[in-house]
Amino acid sequence: MKISGIRWIAMMGLALAAIGCQRSYDDNKDIFNRFYMTDLKQSASSDVLNVIKTLQREDTAQTGNLVASFGDDNDGMISWFNLVAFDDQTLKASRKYGFMVNERTRRTLLMKPPQKLRLDAQAVVDPQVLAGPYTDENARRLAVLHWLDRQFATDSKQISISSQILASDSLAARQTLSCVLIQLDANPAQAARLAEFEGVRFDHPTLGRSYIRMLIEEDIVKLKIKAGNDWFIGTDFKTHSDVINM
């Protein structure tokens, strides 16, 4: 059966509209672009406030030395936040987090498989944690990861009282970190692969196949987690540009 030119144009318009509607969320570029626009030890609160809110469906929250932006899509199935903590002395950004979770399961021919969960984090590490006595480098990596987990727990607890979105997303992020830590604590030798492009694979209890990569560059730790099988359909974690360019 032939399709008329008008019908073809209409079909293509619907396809582009469907893709456009999900771009900000499923591609998560808008969500994470502002994560990269904050520079640790350089960005002041005024700098962060100028870039942390970029999507229309977002709110902001501030408490103490923390500022966050957060939002969700129309049906609440996709939600996200960006969170920045500032050093009490320098008043410059000392920790930052970006998070997105997609609870949609529906797929169509016009929509790529949903990317389920992503957590990015960077932090200026406590010098005592970096220098503490460790039996080997793997123990040091694990100590830094545990420290970052504690910092995120403290930061998210302070700010999450501002919003149910922040509270539920912070819990989802912490549960994901907990999965990684349980696995690495049981098998510390795996920590040797944290800095590799392949990262360390782990299984999220509900999302399945997941990966973590962590770099320690001087006094800054950089973390990336992607959880959910759909991230890796036809592509490997190690080939993702944001993984390569951490």
Image (cartoon, rainbow, N blue to C red):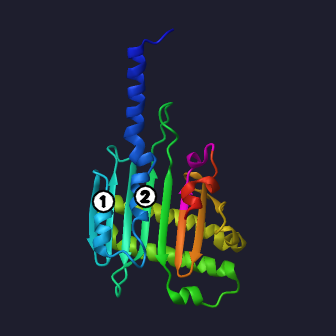
Q: Where is residue 67 in the image (x, y as percent from the top left)?
A: 31, 70
Establish if 245 lies above or below 23.
below
Occupied quadrant, residue 5: top left
Q: Distance between the residues labelled 2 and 1?
A: 11 Å
Number of residue marks: 2
Q: Which mark is residue 82?
A: none
In depth, the one of 103 and 120 nearer the eye is 120
Give the residue number, with chain letter if any, for mark 2: 32
Q: Which amino acid does label 2 sit on?
A: Phe
Whether 230 is among the magenta residues is yes
Occupied quadrant, residue 132: bottom right
Give the residue number, with chain letter if any, for mark 1: 53
Q: Is mark 1 on a helix, strand or loop?
A: loop
Q: Which residue lies furthest to the top in this view?
A: 1
Q: Which amino acid does label 1 sit on?
A: Lys
Establish if 69 lies above or below 136.
above
Disc nearer the start of the sequence (2/1) = 2
Residue at 58% in and 54% down: 240
Q: Position of residue 57 (x, y in %)?
A: 29, 51
Quarter of the image with the C terminus is: bottom right
Residue at 38% in and 60% down: 81
Whether 171 is among the magenta residues is no
Q: Where is residue 144 in the image (x, y as percent from the top left)?
A: 56, 79
Q: Where is residue 213 in the image (x, y as percent from the top left)?
A: 60, 65
The magenta region covers: 225-234
Residue 161 visible at all: no
Residue at 42% in and 63% down: 35
